[in-house]
Amino acid sequence: PFTLPDGGQASFCLQLPNGEREFHPLVLCLHGGGAGAGTGGQIHSYLGSLLPADAVVLCPSVPRQVGNAWDEASNHRYVEELLRHVTRQVPVDPDRVYVCGHSMGGWGTFSMSADFLDRWAACAAFSGGFGSTQFEAYRNTPFYLCHGDKDESMCYVGYSRAADAMFKKLGNGYVHAYDEFPGGHGVPLELRKKGLSWMLAKTRPRCPAQVIVLKDLAY
């Protein structure tokens, strides 16, 4: 269990790296679910287990299983403290820190990445959605999107189509990729592997040519 900033406790799944790298990539995986459902172990099976053995894989469970839990400010603080805790224990490459998720975790990928945009090398949202995300801020943060064309869940396919259109409209400097497949909310294994590989190929630029600063980010 991990002690939360408010004194409560939460659990997480942590995969430690193999190999002899001096510094390791770290991937934050956010689970789906909602009211009464979703755990870090679940998303480790769905996404985390597909990641390379030399990566640190961090899969937190939300303290309270409610709809859109990853949007809550208290859970952003929880994840921030958990990341600090892990990076103090394991040598992590600061230019290779990633966030990804499925369903509610895909929604959380948007909200969590918006909170700490200067941290991530890249993001990947599988069957996700978003609130009032300011896409202009993602100039130096590559984003992978993946969705089924028949997804009619709360995180329906229209969210990913809208995000794809917005990134295309912003043009050069906004690196993204979008895969739409025939199907519903669950993502085929080959596309999960493809999206994670695309994400892990990116490295955070240490001296970006241009930085976009926006006030009053929604998250």
Image (cartoon, helix red, strand yellow):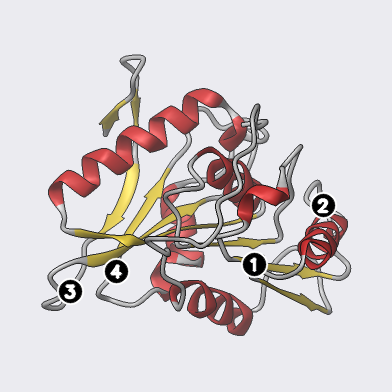
In front: label 2 or label 3: 3
> For the residues marked 1 and 4, what is the alpha-carbon distance in whole angstroms?
27 Å
Dot 1 and dot 4 residues touching (CB under 8 Å): no
Q: Which residue is mark 4?
A: 55
Which residue is depicted at the point 26% across and 39% down? 84
Residue kind at label 4, given as amino acid type: Ala
The first of marks 1 and 4 along the sequence is 4
Dot 4 and dot 2 residues touching (CB under 8 Å): no
Q: Secondary structure at mark 3?
A: loop
Residue kind at label 2, given as amino acid type: Ser
Q: Secondary structure at mark 2?
A: loop
**Other-residue count near label 3 (Cα within 10 Å), few / some / many at <14 / 14–19 / ≥20:** few
Label of residue 173 in the image: 1
Residue kind at label 3, given as amino acid type: Asn
The first of marks 4 and 2 along the sequence is 4
In the picture, the quarter occupied by the C terminus is top right
> For the residues marked 4 and 3, what is the alpha-carbon distance in whole angstroms?
8 Å
Q: Which residue is mark 3?
A: 18
Left or right: where 81 falls relative to 182 = left
> For the residues marked 4 and 2, what is the alpha-carbon distance in whole angstroms?
31 Å
Q: Position of residue 142 (x, y in %)?
A: 58, 65
**Other-residue count near label 2 (Cα within 10 Å), few / some / many at <14 / 14–19 / ≥20:** few
Q: Position of residue 158 (x, y in %)?
A: 88, 57
In the picture, the quarter occupied by the N terminus is top left
The residue lying toward the viewer, choosing from 185 and 135, is: 135
Which residue is depicted at the point 66% across and 53% down? 103
Which residue is depicted at the point 84% across and 79% down? 182
